[in-house]
Image (cartoon, rainbow, N blue to C red):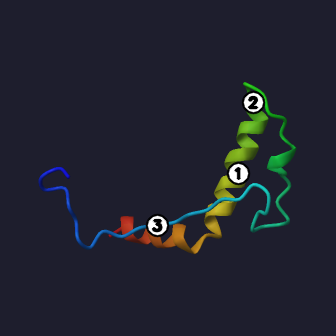
Amino acid sequence: MLAGSYVPDAGFYVIEVNLSAPQRKAHLLQPQDIETSLSLTPQQIADLKAFARAELAGSPEWQRLMQDLAR
């Protein structure tokens, strides 16, 4: 352990984004339908970002983390 790095009241956040079972079923992107390759198109990247943004918005743990960071 590094000297001075122990924080007894540290909080933990478990934030899960599941590509197989998204929280918001109405989202147009189906991430599992994106072919696996070494590159993504700009549209696929934009779609993945939008998917992640929507999933995180519905995560209570993400909201708790954002509130704690705002303090």
- Neighbor class of circle 1 (other Cα within 10 Å; few <14, some 14-19, many 20+) is some
- Along the polypeptide, which appears first: circle 1 or circle 2? 2
Q: Nearer the viewer, residue 67 or 21?
A: 21
Camera-nearest label, 1 or 2: 2
- Neighbor class of circle 3 (other Cα within 10 Å; few <14, some 14-19, many 20+) is few
Find residue 67 and report its image quarter. bottom left
Q: Which mark is residue 40?
A: 2
Camera-nearest label, 3 or 1: 3
Find residue 37 and report its image quarter. top right
- Along the polypeptide, which appears first: circle 3 or circle 1? 3
Which x, y percent locates residue 60? 57, 74
Q: Which mark is residue 13?
A: 3
Find residue 15 and report its image quarter. bottom right
Q: Which mark is residue 50?
A: 1
Q: Mark 2: which secondary structure?
A: loop
Q: Nearer the viewer, residue 5 or 55?
A: 5
Q: Amino acid at mark 2?
A: Leu
Alpha carbons under labels 3 and 1: distance apart: 22 Å
Q: Amino acid at mark 1?
A: Ala
Q: Is residue 6 left or right of residue 27?
A: left
Q: Nearer the viewer, residue 20 or 1?
A: 1
Q: Which mark is residue 3?
A: none
Which x, y percent locates residue 39? 73, 25
- Along the polypeptide, which appears first: circle 3 or circle 2? 3
Alpha carbons under labels 1 and 2: distance apart: 15 Å
Q: Amino acid at mark 3?
A: Tyr
